[in-house]
Image (cartoon, rainbow, N blue to C red):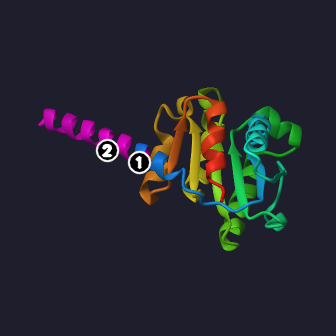
Amino acid sequence: MKRATVLTAILALAISSIAVSMAAGQATTAIADKPALLTSIGQSADLEMVKVLLGRGKIPFTADPLVKASGLPGTAKTLILSVGGSSKGLGAAGISSEDEITRTKALVKRAKELGMKIIVIHVGGEARRGALSDAFIELCVPAGDLVIVVADGDKDGLFVKLASPTGIPVVKVEKITAAGAPLAAAFK
């Protein structure tokens, strides 16, 4: 009986890995329209890295780390959520994690109402994980149309677990600079 349980667990893990690989292949399909609006969810410095990736990919965008739902859509057709919690960043912005969660929920709801595509990106890796970031990740990933994550940031499989029920493509990359290719390929 114990052996059957172990085999079932191994099979489930293998299927999950195949699903992620398949999703990575699907992610090269352009799903998003230009221009994009980039915001920070959790107020980490990772937003700056995503700006660089968008610039290198020649994706027109504006960045507003504190944009509110009332600021959508502006000229943006796609919302990019750079997810990574930073207590220092939240403090500098003068907001609490609860305020950030409230802003995030309203922002995602409004983007969905407007039919905007949502790209969730986590480039902070393992160092940018923990209870604070995970709260934001758990809000954003299920709302995304595409998730891009530096692989060591998903060692525990949280991103895949959150995306799998609805088939959201998850693209794992080995390093931050590699996130630029699937990000650029996501745009029409």
Would you say the residues marked 1 and 2 are in contact, meaning their CB atoms lie under 8 Å apart? no
Is residue 174 part of the magenta span, yes or no? Answer: no
Name which quarter of the figure residue 90 lies in. Answer: top right
Residue 134 versus residue 60: which sits nearer the camera?
Answer: 60
Q: Predominant secondary structure in magenta?
A: helix
Task: Name the mark on residue 22.
Answer: 1
Position of residue 70 in the picture relative to residue 124 (left or right): right
Q: Secondary structure at mark 1?
A: helix
In the image, residue 92 sits, relative to residue 28, either above or below, namely above
Q: Amino acid at mark 2?
A: Ile
Position of residue 158 in the picture relative to residue 19 (left or right): right
Q: Locate residue 21, reporting x and y percent.
A: 42, 43
In this rendering, the count of numbered labels is 2
Q: Locate residue 7, reporting x and y percent.
A: 19, 36
Quarter of the C terminus within the rendering: bottom right
Name which quarter of the figure residue 11 lies in. Answer: top left
Q: Residues within 10 Å of mark 1 (few under 14, many from 20)?
A: some
Quarter of the N terminus within the rendering: top left
Task: Name the mark on residue 15.
Answer: 2
Instruction: State which mark lies toward you, 1 or 2.
Output: 1
Is residue 14 part of the magenta span, yes or no? Answer: yes
Q: Tell me the residue at 62%/34% (across/down).
A: 178
Q: Amino acid at mark 1?
A: Met
Q: Tell me the residue at 79%/42% (across/down).
A: 55
Task: Name the mark on residue 114.
Answer: none
Q: Tell me the residue at 49%/50% (across/down).
A: 162
Q: Residues within 10 Å of mark 2 (few under 14, many from 20)?
A: few
Q: Is residue 162 shown to the viewer in this render?
A: yes
Q: CA distance from mark 1 to mark 2?
A: 10 Å
Residue range corresponding to the magenta coloring? 1-20
Q: Is residue 122 shown to the viewer in this render?
A: no
Residue 136 versus residue 12: which sits nearer the camera?
Answer: 12
